[in-house]
Image (spheres, helix red, strand yellow):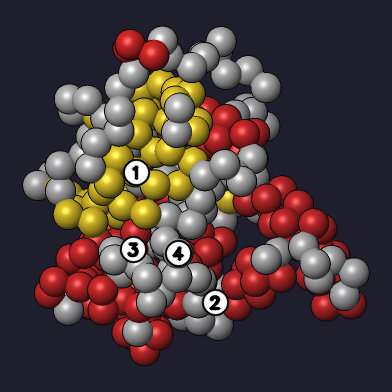
Amino acid sequence: MDFHGIRLPDKENIIVPGKKLSAGTNANVFEWGTGKVIKIFKASYPLELIDTEYYNALAVKQFPFKKSIPVELKKTEFGYGIVYEKIQGENLIDYISRTGDLKGAALKMAELQRSINKVQLDPEKTGALPTAHEVLRKKMAESPKADSDATREMIRFLGTMKDGNVLCHGNLSVDNVMLTDDGPCALSASGYCIGNTLYDIAKSFYLIAYSPLPGEGAEKCAFCGKFSDMEVRKEFGRHYLNAMGHTATEIGYYLSMVIAGL
């Protein structure tokens, strides 16, 4: 894998990560010098996925929506990481914990998601990003449920569905949105792909209402606050669907495929 020849820094020239800003399932984010942060991935996280996230971030850098801007890949004594320009603002999960404003938070997240989905691309001319259907098919084929009749039928049905041509974030949830003075901003570049808006909504709805919380667990997560309550998460999910102008029925096929790929 090409990491551009990056290597461990000289002992006397090490930049030590600063304050931890957030904790996630696969990585933690720290302050990194002036005006930057570094997302350091855990040792168990595959290097090829770090590479993918970095190149995804570069691939969407040109598009006119607010997102974290990549600076470089970095190998540190603490693990591999991606350096990003620092975003000044409040994480959406912290906003919810501070205000309890679920409807307002859902509107902010929907505003950001619509700005991403406005970008239209030709999958045949954009080799840097996979299609949503490619992502779903791969995840379902590699899941522990791959041999089940239900998963095989979903893979077959996916082949009959028309893929879309909009940019999908593929990983947008409350912990991947920053609220800034200029509007909401997208974090994480791991899931960008080209597909149908309904796929992006279904993935976000799953992350909101059903996925494990970031960090080491709900009881230990210092960043989750009120959002660790499942009823709060499900209520937020309902507000989010309303804000996106879609129903659970409309995203049902894609939601089932997202779950089947776990």
Q: Residue at x 35, y 84 (%)?
A: 229
Instruction: Please provide percent x and percent y for residue 150.
Output: 83, 78
Q: Is residue 255 in view?
A: yes
Labels 4 and 3: the sequence-earlier one: 3
Q: Residue at x 31, y 52 (%)?
A: 22
Labels 1 and 4: the sequence-earlier one: 1
Q: Is residue 21 left or right of residue 143?
A: left
Q: CA distance from mark 4 to mark 3?
A: 17 Å
Provide the residue designation for mark 2.
Answer: 250
Provide the residue designation for mark 1.
Answer: 29
Q: CA distance from mark 1 to mark 2?
A: 35 Å
Res 216 label: 4
Q: Quadrant of residue 158?
A: bottom right
What amino acid is labelled 2 in the image?
Glu
Labels 1 and 3: the sequence-earlier one: 1
What amino acid is labelled 1 in the image?
Val
* Viewer-nearest of discs 1 and 2: 1
Is 124 above or below relative to 27? above
Q: Secondary structure at mark 1?
A: strand
Provide the residue designation for mark 3.
Answer: 174
Instruction: Please provide percent x and percent y for residue 251.
Output: 55, 73
Labels 2 and 3: the sequence-earlier one: 3
Q: Is residue 245 in view?
A: no
* Quadrant location, the N terminus: top right
Disc 2 and disc 4 in contact, CB within 8 angstroms: no
Res 95 label: none
